[in-house]
Image: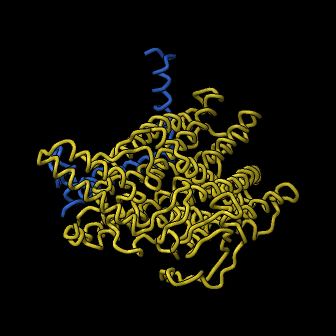
Chain colours: A blue, B yellow
């Protein structure tokens, strides 16, 4: 890769940036832990999609109609 | 229908609302500081770009570091709100349809690509890119965050004023018919301007408070002095801007959510030449007997000010709660407002027509019958939600919260204008580095107070539109999923612990970095 190319300079920017981080390392760790908790723990175990669990694919409208208009 | 609603756990609605409020309030701790500090650090770096004085570069780096900590801590906290839509508010999520999808998708793309790209250049690029490109990246980081806020506020504004859509009875969803109407509705524009400008106040207060702390400790004097000046100028301009945009927001609310305005003002019976209540005695824990009271006790008010706020005319007509329930007055559209009773009847017609349309279509009936049901549904769709209303009490928001939250927001806004004016007086006429200690302490006290004011704004916006999740179309108890309240309660407390921990971690990191102070003449600081 040419050292003067845009892609190399972009790569270099991120590489050097991440290498020289100080407090940024701790922030990234917190962000990753937070993303794990949100997307893995909370989403999978506590926040399933209610409609996809209670209605067949393509039948969501019917399910919601039954819920809202059930005589 | 009654059978269905009787199966819903009443606690589910309240816990789902509480959980959403908790998440939104927590999310809003980070967003305004991000938006506000983006302006502050942009100005600091612009000073560096113009003067080439390294002092300004170090000042800009210091505020960028605090911005970065807040930014990192706030990342993805808003995603949880979307999870809650899908789990706790599934009927609402389906009914909203694609209206939310488009703005939130744009928000996601903008947030990811624009913010992440320019944030990286801002933090890593001091010696890698030109000064001009770096300055552009700094401003674009703030612009990206502001554009993200735009789309979220568009989605929120649509719930308060559903425009640019049509309900599809086959899919049971609202479908966007005019992107421009959704994205550029006057309600959304007013909400965006008021919200973002008020966020700048938080950034300015934070800057002034941190600078005040340094001055009190007699350290980082040049940085604190320069930051105090810029923070106070941004603060006073933003605070006055918030007052102007607040007027526009109130005008918008009066047009499309008159009940919210009436609740904010505890205006039981309206009329022309209405005065704006400064303060009145209202029991904060109990809904007042608005049906029988003429007005709140011990009311002190500014003559004609409410009429002006709501109609831009000192003598304009402002309906009170009882007027809205009775109807019969000429509303903002120039039409005679139907009574609540009429709205309920029309809502019930819409629901019945929708049920009949779907059943008839299943049975394979002729087009003429379907068209007839469709015509009834379309002509009454704007009152669809009223079909679920059983009594007038259900359409009146809890008045004390709206009344006091509105006054706290406005009162704090006035106090902040005074505060920034005093700071600027010391900056320009006295010596801010030798100001009395109470001024520095008051600057620190302004951080929680300005946050309270900002959160009060959201309390008014969201409590004031009760019982509607979508104004006039869907009340909360219809929007909620048929789930157990215990499961929502468990996640509420999980969030409480998680959010409190994250907040404690953020505050600890922020305070540590503030105590450490700026790092002068170093290559990278984050």
Residue at point 66%, 70% (across, down): B274
Residue A37: tell me if it is visible: no
x and y, in percent, of residue B36 in the image: 61, 50
Q: Nearer the viewer, residue B115 or B4?
A: B4
Taking B391 as reference, is B281 above or below it?
below
Q: Nearer the viewer, residue A17 or B341?
A: B341
Residue B9: tell me if it is visible: yes
Q: Nearer the viewer, residue B520 or B349?
A: B349
Q: Quadrant of the C terminus of chain B?
A: top right
Instruction: Give the left or right position of residue B369, taking residue B208 as reference.
Output: left
x and y, in percent, of residue B173 in the image: 30, 48
x and y, in percent, of residue B53 in the image: 75, 36
Q: Nearer the viewer, residue B53 or B24?
A: B24
Taking B139 as reference, is A44 above or below it?
below
Instruction: Give the left or right position of residue B155, taking residue B173 as reference.
Output: right
Instruction: Give the left or right position of residue B85, taking residue A55 as reference.
Output: right
Q: Residue furthest top?
A: A2
Taking B251 as reference, is B322 above or below it?
below
Q: Quadrant of the N terminus of chain B?
A: bottom left
Q: Residue furthest front?
A: B368
Residue at point 73%, 61% (across, down): B417
x and y, in percent, of residue B347 in the image: 34, 61
Q: Residue furthest left?
A: B363
């Amino acid at each position: 890769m040419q050292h003067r190319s845009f892609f190399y300079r972009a790569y270099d920017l991120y590489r050097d940036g991440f290498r020289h981080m100080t407090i940024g390392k701790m922030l990234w760790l917190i962000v990753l832990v937070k993303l794990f908790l949100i997307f893995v723990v909370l989403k999978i175990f506590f926040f399933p999609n209610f409609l996809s669990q209670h209605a067949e694919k393509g039948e969501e409208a019917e399910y919601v109609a039954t819920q809202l208009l059930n005589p | 229908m009654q059978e269905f609603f009787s199966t819903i756990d009443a606690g589910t609605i309240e816990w789902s609302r509480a959980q959403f409020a908790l998440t939104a309030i927590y999310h809003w701790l980070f967003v305004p500081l991000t938006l506000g500090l983006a302006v502050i650090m942009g100005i600091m770096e612009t000073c560096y770009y113009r003067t080439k004085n390294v002092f300004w570069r170090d000042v800009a780096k210091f505020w960028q570091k605090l911005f970065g900590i807040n930014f990192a801590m706030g990342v993805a906290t808003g995603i949880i709100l979307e999870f809650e839509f899908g789990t706790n508010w599934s009927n609402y999520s389906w009914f909203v349809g694609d209206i939310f999808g488009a703005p939130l998708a744009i928000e996601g793309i903008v947030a990811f690509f624009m913010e992440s790209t320019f944030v990286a250049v801002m933090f890593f690029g001091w010696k890698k890119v030109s000064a001009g490109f770096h300055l552009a990246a700094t401003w674009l980081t703030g612009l990206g965050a502001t554009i993200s806020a735009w789309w979220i506020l568009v989605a929120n504004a649509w719930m308060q004023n559903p425009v640019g859509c049509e309900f599809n009875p086959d899919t049971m969803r609202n479908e966007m018919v005019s992107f421009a109407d959704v994205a550029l509705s006057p309600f959304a524009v007013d909400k965006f301007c008021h919200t973002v400008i008020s966020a700048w106040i938080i950034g300015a207060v934070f800057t002034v408070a941190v600078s005040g702390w340094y001055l009190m400790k007699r350290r980082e004097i040049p940085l604190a002095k320069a930051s105090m000046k810029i923070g106070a100028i941004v603060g006073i301009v933003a605070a006055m801007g918030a007052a102007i945009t607040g007027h526009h927001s109130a005008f918008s609310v009066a047009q499309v959510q008159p009940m919210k305005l009436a609740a904010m003002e505890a205006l039981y019976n309206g009329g022309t030449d209405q005065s704006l209540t400064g303060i009145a005695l209202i029991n904060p824990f109990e809904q007042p007997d608005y049906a029988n009271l003429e007005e709140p006790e011990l009311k002190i008010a500014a003559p004609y000010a409410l009429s002006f706020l709501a109609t831009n005319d000192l003598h304009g007509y402002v309906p009170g709660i009882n007027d809205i329930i009775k109807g019969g007055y000429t509303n903002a559209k120039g039409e005679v407002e139907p009574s609540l009773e009429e709205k309920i009847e029309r809502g019930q017609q819409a629901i019945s027509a929708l049920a009949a349309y779907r059943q008839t279509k299943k049975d394979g009936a002729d087009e003429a019958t379907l068209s007839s049901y469709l015509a009834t549904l379309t002509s009454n769709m704007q009152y669809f939600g009223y079909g679920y209303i059983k009594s007038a009490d259900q359409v009146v928001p809890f008045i004390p919260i709206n009344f006091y939250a509105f006054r706290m927001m406005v009162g704090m806004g006035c106090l902040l204008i005074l505060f920034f004016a005093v700071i600027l007086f010391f900056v320009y006429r006295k010596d801010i580095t030798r100001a009395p200690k109470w001024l520095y302490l008051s600057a620190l006290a302004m951080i929680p107070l300005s946050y309270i004011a900002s959160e009060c704004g959201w309390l008014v916006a969201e409590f004031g539109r009760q019982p509607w999740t979508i104004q006039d179309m869907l009340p909360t108890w219809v929007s909620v999923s048929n789930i157990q309240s215990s499961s929502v309660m468990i996640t509420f407390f999980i969030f409480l612990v998680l959010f409190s921990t994250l907040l404690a971690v953020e505050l600890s990191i922020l305070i540590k970095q503030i105590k450490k102070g700026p790092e002068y003449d170093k290559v990278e600081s984050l």
